[in-house]
Amino acid sequence: MHEQDDSSTEKTDMTEMITEESVVSKVQELMETLDSIKKYNAFATSFKKFTLIIVSFLAVFFVIMGTLEFYDMKSPLGSSVFFSASFLALLIPISGIVTGVLFVRRKVNAVRTGEWKEELSHGFPSALKMLGELDWETTFDEISLGKLSYVLYGLMKATAYWVITFSAFRLLGTVVTLLVLQRTETFGAVFWAALAMLVVLFTLGNDLLKRYKEILSLDLLLIELRWFSFEFRKAEF
């Protein structure tokens, strides 16, 4: 009987140690992660405006290029005038990317984080209070939405890079072949599109790899949080 009491006491002490030390640490890790999720959600709230900025600047660029080609066919502008105007027109989508990226960064940097630190500094009771007030389902939805927006933002930015690179390569290639070979075009659009894709992948490779790893981390986080939510709800404190 005495041995059973000792065993029960030891188990209780171990439970208290796990509860008071591990739970506070786990809550701190959770809140730090949720701060990161807030930044991902900033992508969600600003993605539509970012897309509108990129599409608007690209639309203006294509309209200008179409107008230049139309007038060049009607009354030739001269190769030097046409290509100079075309390269200047490339500044429009470049400005669009810069504007869009700066807009998103401003939104992300404006996210307030770490507001929970003071409350959590009070220890285990505060940790339990924070967990009890946490809306788990909303948190899961925010993680999923933030992940999707983060992916779409990366794809939209890569697409804009590709359009600019493709247009620049095609214009530059046309200039070179016209001056050197006295021909309007040697390589087709497919060649320049593929080359532009390779350049974009090389340029944004590290960024795309980083995003891929972060998406995997978010997937693992969702699984871990669902398990932690289940364990917390059935636990007795």
Image: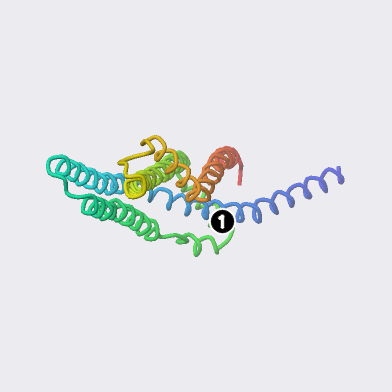
* Residue 139 position within the rendered picture, expressed as x and y whole percent measured from the top left: 45, 43
Query: Does the rendering let one see residue 6?
Result: yes
Q: Give the residue drawn at x 83%, y 48%.
A: 6
* Residue 216 position within the rendered picture, expressed as x and y whole percent measured from the top left: 55, 41
Give whichever of 145, 31 is nearer the camera.
145
Mark 1 is surrounded, within 10 Å at the Cα level, by few (under 14), some (14 to 19) or many (20 or more) other residues, namely some
Q: Quadrant of residue 25?
A: bottom right
When the figure is inspected, residue 194 is found, relative to residue 96, above or below; the finding is: above
Under mark 1, the amino acid is: Gln
Q: Give the residue drawn at x 65%, y 51%.
A: 19
Give whichever of 46, 177 is nearer the camera.
177
Query: Does the rendering let one see residue 46?
Result: no
When the figure is inspected, residue 106 is found, relative to residue 233, above or below; the finding is: below
**Left or right: where does residue 222 sit relative to residue 63?**
right
**Left or right: where does residue 227 sit relative to residue 45?**
right
Give whichever of 233, 173 is nearer the camera.
173
Chosen colour scheme: rainbow
**Left or right: where does residue 118 sit relative to residue 162?**
right
**Left or right: where does residue 122 sit relative to residue 5?**
left
Give whichever of 137, 90 is nearer the camera.
90
The image shows a total of numbered marks equal to 1
* Residue 163 position within the rendered picture, expressed as x and y whole percent measured from the top left: 35, 44
* Residue 65 position within the rendered picture, expressed as x and y whole percent measured from the top left: 22, 45
SS of the residue under disc 1: helix
Q: Which residue is mark 1?
A: 28
Q: Give the residue drawn at x 18%, y 46%.
A: 68
Q: Quadrant of the N terminus?
A: top right
